Amino acid sequence: MSAAHPPRAEVLIDLSAVRHNVGLLAARAAESGAETMAVVKADGYGHGAAPVARAAVEAGASWLGTASLAEALDLRDAGITVRLLSWLDTTGVDFTPGIASDIELSVSSVQELARVADAAGRAGRTARVHLKIDTGLSRNGCPAYAWPDLVKAAAAEPDVDVVAIWSHLACADEPGHPSIDMQANRFATAYAVAREAGLRPLRHLANSAATLTRPDLHFDIVRPGIAVYGLNPVAQPEQLRPAMTFRSSVVLTKRIEAGESVSYGHTWTARRDTTLALVPVGYADGVPRTLSGRMSVWLWGSRRPVVGRVCMDQLVVDCGDDEPPLGAEVVLFGTGEVGEPTATEWAETIGTIDYEIVTGMYRPRVRRRFIGEAGRR
């Protein structure tokens, strides 16, 4: 890790790790004859959508996926030209700029299809759409009872080209869960209905977990999300490399006597004389308050416990008889390679998922810096 002093709070994004991960995933998909769509929604899961998208394309992704049309248009504005799918917007969104920018759109209902077709007419070009079937997640997607009407309407719409049908798995991160095969069977039925309506669509179903564990579900395109960023959704060894490191620095040290307490509520009291290090990050910067008394950091060559409550702007580290220098690097989470905490460890400690941890790191006071860019160290 760099010995350079970080700012108040910083996330380092290692784009070489992104390229490594996408290369691994794309190779896995290619074994099944599938292309790779790297999902870069939510500003690249908090990692920076455009730089991650470029790294993913360099590593073999031929598609990109976003949730909103605005996210997709931002990628086009950044000069990214690969095939791009957007899949969830409000009813008031105008699809015309997306169609004009060659962004492919997901459609889950006849009403949505009509809005896309209308926008295509105004754009003066055919809209490329991916019809989404709900196979059991019960979120977005067309329910099975409405699917025949949707595919027939789409097949008959002159301003629409149906590129693909797709769905999303509910429990792929639990290999062997019976819902996976149930959803796959429903997806097969939906595909047969689409074919009967005269469509010849591509198919995509596999998320990160299914990309890693279910090659039979790769079909034509896989859609890895969290694995792009080096976080493994399944409990099996993979050579994924976490791309994000969250760090700060020591701004003050002080010696306290046994019996003195730390932070709001005096939830921690020193059992012996000890040295405390103050770190200027807190829950306003992405450190969950629920980690109070349950976390450690990597500081001056070892793990050290955070004591007392995590505050809005600061936390306190117990350094025992060591006294780290002012400006010493504090790694709150990273790759885990040298023993530092990881985003996954944070998530498991507080009962959430590491997706939430990294996505939540896009904060006004947290500077984002990219390393490992193509052609650079």
Image (cartoon, grey):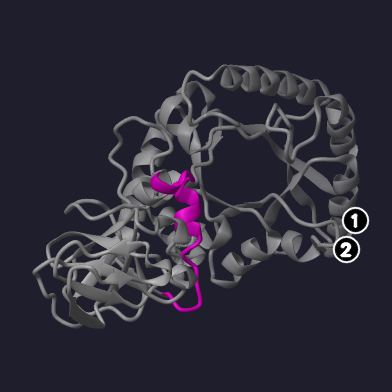
Residue at horizontal 38%, vertical 51%? Answer: 346
Q: Nearer the viewer, residue 329 or 82?
A: 329
The percent coordinates of residue 122 (x first, y second) are 88, 63
In the rendered structure, the answer to whether residue 303 lies left or right of residue 97 reads: left
Q: Residues within 10 Å of mark 2 (few under 14, many from 20)?
A: some
Residue at horizontal 49%, vertical 66%? Answer: 50
Marking on residue 118: 1
Marking on residue 274: none
Does the CB distance between marks 2 and 1 fall below 8 Å? yes
Residue 352 higher or lower than 66, as above or below: above
Q: Residues within 10 Å of mark 1 (few under 14, many from 20)?
A: some
Real-space CA distance between mark 2 and mark 1, rounded to the nearest whole angstrom = 6 Å
Q: Secondary structure at mark 1?
A: helix
Residue at horizontal 39%, vertical 59%? Answer: 292
Whether residue 313 is visible, yes or no, is yes
Q: Which residues are magenta?
A: 349-366
Q: Nearer the viewer, residue 156 or 343?
A: 343
The percent coordinates of residue 215 (x first, y second) are 46, 24
Residue at horizontal 39%, vertical 29%? Answer: 31
In the rendered structure, the answer to whether residue 174 lies left or right of residue 15 reads: right
Residue 62 higher or lower than 309, as above or below: above
Q: Mark 2 = which residue?
A: 122
